[in-house]
Image (tube, rainbow, N blue to C red):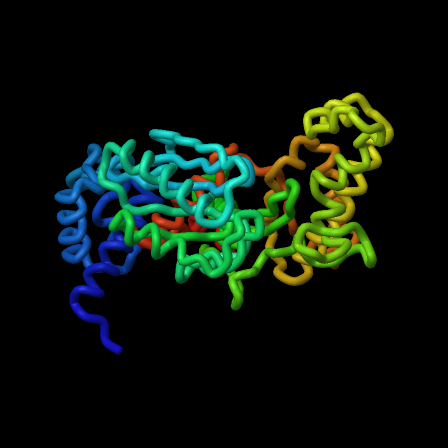
Amino acid sequence: MKATNRETRAHNERLVLATIYDSGPISRAAVARATGLTRTTVSDVVGELLAGGLTREIGRGPSTGGKAPILLGVVDDARHLIGIDLAEDAFRGAVVNLRGQVMQRRELPLEGRDGQAALERVFELTDALVQAARRPVVGIGVGTPGLSDATGGTVLQAANLDWRELPLGRLIQERYEMPAYVANDSQALALAEHVFGARRTTNLVVVKVGRGVGAGLVLEGRLFQGDGFGAGEIGHTTVVEDGALCRCGGHGCLETVAGTRAVLDRLSPGAVGVRPITLDDAVAAFGRGDATALAAVFEAARYLGLALAGLVGTLNVRRIVLVGPMTAFGDPWLRVVRETMRGHALARLTAETNVELGHLDADSVILGASALLLTNELGLLLLPAAAERPS
């Protein structure tokens, strides 16, 4: 089907904006070379972006013999994005600019709410964030636990919130009359690391290891969710036959042996009335070289390494980033994860695979939810520089 003039114009605008976003400061001529568009088309599109305040002229570049070219850049604060993280203990959100800089932050404790009460809490938080925005808002992105259909904005299942088939995206869009997108929190983390992390690669796996274990996949520069939107749900694959009961109802799931629960359970005292062991306690004991803590943490690391070996063999993605509370055990934990992975997958593949700790902070789900708006509403391609793409 032939594209209409409006569709072609929108495509060109997104292509030009994406190029300026990723490569600016950049001249109009360089944009034309990078996009394959004519100089006339680029000039027209840039004129519209300048008029809309999304880009600006920021000086002249070096001359190659003629007149020095005028350079273009994106106005980072031209639009704001609202990102929300529906975490287990509290709902958090922020107003961020186009580069992921947090402008305003809000947080509301969940306090055991679920079902309709939890949904009302989402609206309460979003109300505050919409009021806090000081620039036109592109839309609202949400990172939620459980299974989510990012294409339709539906939370298919979030057990801790007692949500099933909840059309969260549609409800937010209708209430606030602006675009809304929903993704699983692990998938949001992957998008955050891809867009705002230390470097951008074509393919990326981000694994969150806390009480739960989940992976987010970016393949060919795009968030990959799988046919049933459950890509990356590695935490609920059985790794120990007849193992411990998991919160999903199964037994011996990866999260019961690789996450914080496994470590804390091994360190918790049996006496009634004794203060429960916290993650900070476990990290301190591990740092002191406590034998029980070392054994618990390294056993959890080995189970995670086995899971990563499966991912390497299936996807052959060369960059894996680990995030979440278990990363508090640092390089010794990471070393065992790497060694186990390398010992249980094809050596040629694991030799090319880099497993590293994430560089983002507690706002990473918020940033990933915001990045949904960059890709879906502003159409930014968010691909790595040509030098980092596979040949």
Q: Is residue 378 above or below residue 4?
A: above
Image point (78%, 45%), residue name: 302
Say which residue appears at 60% left-offset and 52% top-offset.
318
| Horizontal arrangement in the rendering, residue 192 relative to residue 214 (left or right) | left
Please give the name of the residue rendered at 24% of the width and 32% of the height, measured from the top-left corner.
134
User: Which quadrant, please, contains the N terminus?
Assistant: bottom left
Seen from the viewer's position, the closer of residues 333 and 391 is 333
Image height of 228 relative to 246, above or below: below
* Nearest the eye: 46 or 359: 359
Residue 372 seen from this side = yes
Q: Is residue 255 above or below residue 90?
A: below
Residue 236 point in image, percent of width and height: 67, 56
Q: Is residue 51 left or right of residue 348?
A: left
Percent position of residue 273, x then y: 78, 25
Direction from residue 77 to residue 265 in the image, left or right:
right
Residue ranking furthest to the right:
291
Q: Nearer the viewer, residue 379 or 242?
A: 242
Q: Position of residue 19 (x, y in %)?
A: 31, 49
Residue 190 in sight from this viewpoint: no
Which residue is depicted at the point 59% across and 56% down?
A: 232
Residue 297 horizontal/vertical position (percent): 77, 36
Seen as rendered, the residue at the extreme bottom is 1
